[in-house]
Image: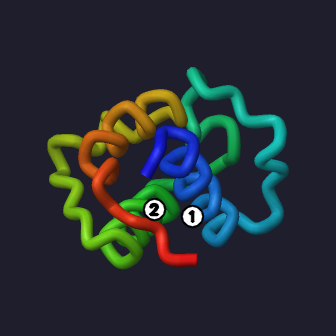
Amino acid sequence: MTREQVRKAVLDIISDIAPDEDLSTIKDDENLRDQFDLDSMDFLDIVMELRKRFNLEVPEKDYQELVSMASSVAYLFPRLKDYELVS
């Protein structure tokens, strides 16, 4: 996956969890939970979706790496760069 594909994958997950949110206004360096009024259960749903979609375990100690879009992409890209998207 490219960095842009990782970013889109995170956006797709957020869209599924918070379908009423306008993701076109996302600011990559701002806290995702604050931007989209996500609660702790929504955040855990994001982590669970990463595991389900990409077979990727995110340890609890690394949750802070997923606070913004920029930090999420930076954290996820090295772990997903060899993952091939199936069209």
Which one is in front, 86 or 40?
86
Proximity of marks 2 and 1: CB atoms separated by less than 8 Å:
yes
| Residue ID at (42%, 39%) | 72
Residue type highlighted by circle 2: Ile
Q: What element carries label 1?
A: helix
Which one is in front, 56 or 59?
56
Q: Relative to residue 76, is residue 56 drawn left or right? A: left
Q: What x and y, as percent, mark residue 62?
A: 21, 41
Q: What element carries label 2?
A: helix
Residue 55 vs 71, above or below: the answer is below
Residue type highlighted by circle 1: Ile
| Residue ID at (58%, 77%) | 87
Q: Which mark is residue 13?
A: 1
Q: Residue furthest top?
A: 29
Circle 2 residues within 10 Å: few <14, some 14–19, many ≥20: some
The tag earlier along the polypeptide, 2 or 1, is: 1
Q: How many labels does the image show?
A: 2
